Image: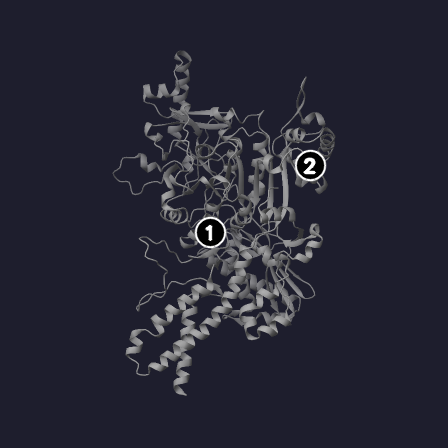
Amino acid sequence: MERIEEIQTQVYNDLYSFFSRFYEEGDFVPQYRYSIRGHKYAIPYNGEEVKLYWANYDQYYIKTGLLFRDYTFKAESYKVIFRTVSAKDELGSNKATKERFFVLDDENPIEINENEVLIRFQYRELSEEEVKNYGVENGSNASKQEKINQRIYEEIKSHLEREKNLGLIKYLEQTKNEKPLLLYHINRFTAKNTRDYFIHKNLRKFLKDQLDYFIKAEVLDIETLENEKFFDKHITRAKVVREIGEKIIDCLSQIEDFQKKLWEKKKFVIRTEYVITLDRLQKWTDKEFFEKALERILSNEKQLKEWEELGFGKIQSKEDLIEKRDSGGVEYKKLPIDTRYFDEGFKFEMLEKISEKYDLDDVLDGLLIKSENWQALNTILNKYKGKVQTIYIDPPFNKEQDADYLYNVKYKDSTWISLLENRLRLARDLLSDRGSIFVRCDYNGNMYVRLLMNEVFGEENFRNEIVVRRGAPKSAMFKQFEGIKSMGVMYDNLFWYSSHPDARYTGFKIAVEKKGGYWSNFYDMKPSGERPTMRYELFGLLPPKNYYWKWGKERALNAVENYKKYLEVAELTGETLEEYSIRTGIRDFVKLEGNSVKYWVPIRETDFLVNNWLDIPGYSAEWNFQTENSEILLKRVIESTSNEGDLVMDFFLGSGTTTAVAHKLKRKWIGIEMGEHFWTVVLPRMKKVLAYDKSGISKEKDVKEKYNEKSAGGFFKYQILEQYEDTLDNIELKENKAIRDLFKDDYLIKYFLEFETKEDPAFLNINMLENPYEYKLKVNLSEVGEPREEKVDLIETFNYLLGLKG
C-alpha cells in the first residue's frame, strides 16, 4: 500500500513537472528551464548542417495587433462582460514609446441589466493627473497596468455596493489564484488583449514525442534505476505516467485542434466595395446609366464631403464634375466614387453594366483587403496561387518599442520568427514561378530573416542582400574617429529571394538624370532623445510636428547662402549645381520649394553598386506615417522585377506605398492591412492616386510618361474579411446526446468540440444557404466597439473558396 501511494505521488509530480513546461495560465507557452541533469526538451533534428529552430517552431502566431474583443465570464446567475469601447490611435505622432493602458470608460463604465453586467473600458494614454492618481510614475507597463487594475477593481466593487448587489459582490470576492475573482478576471482581460498567442499545428504529436523523451530521460533515467532495487516500481510509474499523460494530451489537443480549425478556416468576405473614377464609369457604362449615376452622385452628401476632404474641391453642380468640353465631347474629372456611400442597388447595377463588355477581374487595377494578413493570404490563396510577380513587405521590426498606431511590435525573436514564417510560407505559394520577394528588416532581426528565407524559399533562391538608407547618421559619425563611443545605424537590409533561380530580373533602374544628386526633404524623423537645437525657423518655417531639421542652425543658414551664390553664378554661366559643387568643393545647399525646405544630396560613384541603395531615401514622410517607405525605393523594386500588367503584392501594407507605386507604374496590385489606418491612410491615399497624386515618383521624368493628369484614373475593389475573433464570437455549442452516448467517456476527451459545433454558421451551414443573401454573422468591423450582425458576401466568398475569377 505504501509503495502504491509513493507511486501515485511520483506520477502526480511527474505529470505536473511535464505539463508545466508547456502551459502557463491555461495557454500553451514553452517555458525556459534551467537544468543540472541535462536537456528538458527533445529538439527534432534530422542531421542538417544548420538547423533554424525556435521556441514557437511549428506554431501559428495568431495575433498581430491589439484586437479588442469582449471578455466574458459567469458569476452565479450573471454574465459579466468586459468590453473595450474606445482606443486612442496617435497615428500622426512619431514618438517611439507612448504607453497606453486599460482604464474604465469615462462616460458609462458599468451597466447592470437583468442577468448581465457590462463593464466598459478604454485603451488610451493617461493624462499627467491620472499618472499621479494611479501611482504609475515608475515601473514596467505590466506592473503599471496591475496597479490600475487594482483601482478598477475597487471602483467596480464600490459601484456594486451602491447598487446594493451584495450577492454578486460576495461571489466576485471569492479567491482564485490568491486574488479576488473579479480582479483575477480583470488581470486576464488586460493581459489577453496585449499578450501574444499561438496555436500549435500538431499538438498531439508534439506532446507525445516530448512525453516519450521525458519518460526516458527523467522517469527512467539511468541514475534513478541504478539507485533503485525495485525496477518494477519505476516501470509501473512510467506506464501510468504515459497512460494518464496521453489522456490529458488527447483532451488538450482536442481544444488546440479545434482552435487550429477555426484559424485555418477560409474566412467569409463580410463586405465588398468598389472605387472607380468618374472617367472610367463614363467609358465603361452606357449613357443612360451614366446620366442617372451623375444625379445620384450629386445628391450624395457623404461622397461630396469626402471629395472636399481629399482636396478635390467643392462639388455643387454637374459642371463641377467636368474637366473640359471640346469637339470630341465631354471629358469628366477623375474623381473616385466609393460604392460604400451608395445603396446595394447602385453598386450591383454598376457592376452589371461594366460586366456587359468587360471581365471585372481584367479591368480591376487592384484589391485592398482589411484583415489580419495570414487570414487574408489563406483566403485568397486558391484564386491567386502562382500569380503574383513581385512581393514587397516591410514587417514590423522585432524591437521593444510600440509603434504609434495600434499595432503590437513587441515581437521578440521566436515570436517574431513565427509571425514571419507563417506568412512567408503562404507568400511562397502565391508567387509565380519567376517571381521575386523582398523583405525589409533592420539589425534587430536580419540574422533571423536570412536563415528563415533560406528555409522557406531555399538557399538557391537567394538573389541578394541590399542595403537601404533609413535616415541621417548620428552627428558623431561626422566627427573624427577618435573618441567616438557609438556608431549610428545608417541602413536597413532588403533580402531579395525568388521562387526560382531564373527569376525575372531586368536590372535595377537608376535614373541617369539624378547622377549628380537630388533634392530631398530637409527634416528627419525624431531621433532618440530631445534635440531642441534642431528645431528652429528656416525660411519662416518650423519642421513638421515631431520632426527636426537635419542640420544645426549655423550649417543650415550657410547652406541657404551657398544656394543663393550658386543661383547668381548659374544665371551668368548656366553651370549646373553638380558642376558648381565639384568646382567649388561646396556640398551643402538648402532651398525653399513651395512650402517645403529641401537640401541637396550629392551621389558618389560607389552608390551605384547593385546592392547599395544608399543613393535614394528609404523612408518618406509624405503621408505623415511613421514607417512610410519611400516611393522611389518601391519604384526600383517593382520596375526591376516585373512588367506592366504584372501583379504586385504587399501584405504588411502600412501607409500604402507599394500599391500606390504599383498603380503609377501600371501594375496590378494587392494590399493587405489590418489596422484602422486602412480607413484613415491607405484608402484615402489610393483614392488620391486614382485622381492623380503629384507626390512621390509622380515627379520622375520616366513616370510622367505613363502616369500623369491625363492618364490617371482607375478602378479597384476593397474588402473586409471575417477574422479569427469573429469566428470565436459566432461559435455556438449544441448538445448531441446520440453521439455522446455512442462514445461515452471518450466524448468529452476527444469529440466534444467537433460534434457540438458541426452545424455552426461559422463553418458554412448548408441549411442557411436556402436564403444566401441573408446569411449573417456577428462581426466587429473596427478595433473597438460591439459586435453586430452583418450579411456575408457569399459570392465573393465562393470565388475565393473555388479560385474563380470575379
Judged from this view, the residue extending furthest toward the left is 482
- Relative vertical location of residue 350 with respect to residue 177 in this rendering, above or below: above
In x, y percent, where is residue 290? 71, 31
- Mark 1 residue crowding within 10 angstroms, few (<14) / some (14–19) / many (20+): some
Q: Residue at x 47, y 61 (%)?
A: 202
Closest to the observer: 75 or 688?
Answer: 688
Closest to the observer: 208 or 696?
Answer: 208
Three-letter amino acid code at the position of disc 1: Asn
Question: What is the secondary structure assignment of the residue under circle 2?
Answer: helix
Three-letter amino acid code at the position of disc 2: Met
The residue where tag 1 is placed is 422
In x, y percent, where is residue 175? 53, 72
Closest to the observer: 176 or 793?
Answer: 793
In x, y percent, where is residue 564? 41, 19
Question: What is the secondary structure assignment of the residue under circle 1?
Answer: helix
Residue 787, visible in the rendered structure: no
In x, y percent, where is residue 655? 52, 40
The residue where tag 2 is placed is 350
N-term-proximal mark, 2 vs 1:
2
Left/right placement of residue 103 relative to residue 330 reads left
For residue 299, the mark is none
- Relative vertical location of residue 641 with respect to residue 128 in this rendering, above or below: above
Judged from this view, the residue extending furthest toward the bottom is 1
- Mark 2 residue crowding within 10 angstroms, few (<14) / some (14–19) / many (20+): some
The answer to which quarter of the image holds residue 632 is top left
Quarter placement of the C terminus:
top right
Quarter placement of the N terminus:
bottom left
Distance Cα–Cα, label 2 vs label 1: 38 Å
- Relative vertical location of residue 55 with respect to residue 488 in this rendering, above or below: below
Left/right placement of residue 364 relative to residue 478 reads right
Q: Residue at x 43, y 63 (%)?
A: 206
